[in-house]
Image: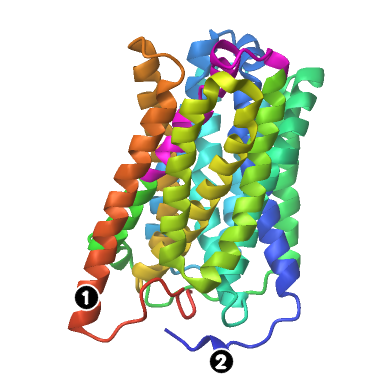
Amino acid sequence: MPDPAAAPHRPHTALAVGALAMGGFAIGTTEFVSMGLLPQMARGVGATIPATGHAISAYALGVVVGAPLVAFLGSGWPRRALLVGLMALFAVGNVATALVSSYDALLVARFVSGLPHGAFFGVASLVAAGLARPGRQGRAVAMVMLGLSVANVLGVPAATWLGQELGYRAAYWLVGALGLVTLALVLAFVPSLPGDSDAHWRRELGALAKPQVLLTVLTGAVGFGGMFAVYTYIVPTLTEVGGLPESAAPVFLLAFGLGMVVGTWLAGELAAWSVFRSLFIGGGGQGLLLLAFSLLAPTGWWTLPVVFGITATGSILVVNLQLRLMEVAGDAQTIGATMNHVALNIANALGAWLGGLVVAAGWGYRAPGLVGFGLSVLGLSVLVLSARLHLSERDERPAAPLGEPPSRPR
């Protein structure tokens, strides 16, 4: 890879990264606001609440489909142009969500809204890392991801309130506008960067056959699923096990969001030390805290700092998974950067599904925490396999030290 010291100094790097973080804020807002507006959406399209919940699944499916598709087809495009196109598609999907009046059209609109999600974060991470000074690539990627975290503290509550007061369509008009603002900021502050002239879909697809890429994706898909096992059922756990009123739920959801913000910032600092070791810290810390949540659930308010810690450690895991994939993908940088969000959406579905299974089996609402602990252990086991493979490869040929961030991810 090119020497990062050879990269020209860019005086507007902070503004460029800020523009990319705004995109993360917009995407984070639309991803989670639907959960708080399901009753209004159900009434708006004449469907039941459980059926309308499939709109959330449609969005996740869009992420899973869109991330590798864009990586295969768009890896050779100029990166600013690709980011602009992704934000334009994002705005279209959310405006369509605000306009449609039928259930089937809603599902299609949410699917389209999800298509740019993973690809935007992947390409934005590559751009941010490429603009950063040597040794600060991890911090730059963390700043992009910070937009997603801040969305859970500010964007989602604000959009939810707006949707409840003015109708759910207003929330998606807002998100569509945020997409257009991001598009304008990217054009204004992100420099025109060439794509990879040697990129080809076969090369990008070939990255998925690399053992380290597969192991890293599996670490995220399994290890991060534990957080969603708890997050999905947090409200009934607090009320039925912890004895708290429903009015306590926003406080815990705020703790979730604040934990994401702090963890994302800390992830960037830890990445400058060691990406691989940070993965173990994030995954191991999250697993222990998920176990603690299950044990302390009956104590009510005492679980509040645990909830904060779960998302803080989880965010350390997420950011460093992003960096690790950018490192191990080799020349197939676009697919490597985007696959992290495919893994996280699989984790979302897996954690919620397994958490629901144990609750439905009669094990109670403390059981999802145990499921989360088990998923974390499995994720760490995959990470250990990845570490052993890395060490064996390093013994066979000269390589970068274990866990060091990439010299200059493209």
Mark 2 sits on what residue? 6
Side (left or right) of 246 relative to 367? right
Query: Could you say where residue 109 lies in the image, as x and y percent from the top left?
Result: 55, 31
* Above or below: residue 346 compared with residue 6: above
* Above or below: residue 341 compared with residue 113: below
Residue 26 picture quarter? top right
Q: Along the line of sight, which residue is nearer the eye, 232 or 88? A: 232
Query: Could you say where residue 289 lies in the image, as x and y percent from the top left?
Result: 49, 39
Mark 1 sits on what residue? 393
* Above or below: residue 3 compared with residue 211: below
Query: Could you say where residue 21 lies in the image, as x and y percent from the top left?
Result: 67, 56
Residue drawn at 60 percent across, 30 percent down? 303
Side (left or right) of 353 relative to 168? left
Give neighbour class at mark 1: few <14, some 14-19, many 20+ (Cα, 10 Å): few
Quarter of the image with the N terminus is bottom left
Residue drawn at 31 percent across, 56 percent down? 383
Q: Magenta segment: does it hold 228?
A: yes
Amino acid residing under circle 2: Ala
Residue 152, visible in the rendered structure: yes
Q: Quick one: SS at disc 2?
A: helix
Question: Magenta span covers which residues?
Answer: 222-247
Query: Could you say where residue 66 lies in the image, as x and y percent from the top left?
Result: 44, 46
Helix, strand or loop: magenta stretch: helix
The number of discs equals 2
Residue drawn at 41 percent across, 65 percent down? 276
Q: Earlier in the sequence, mark 2 or mark 1?
A: 2
Side (left or right) of 402 relative to 19? left
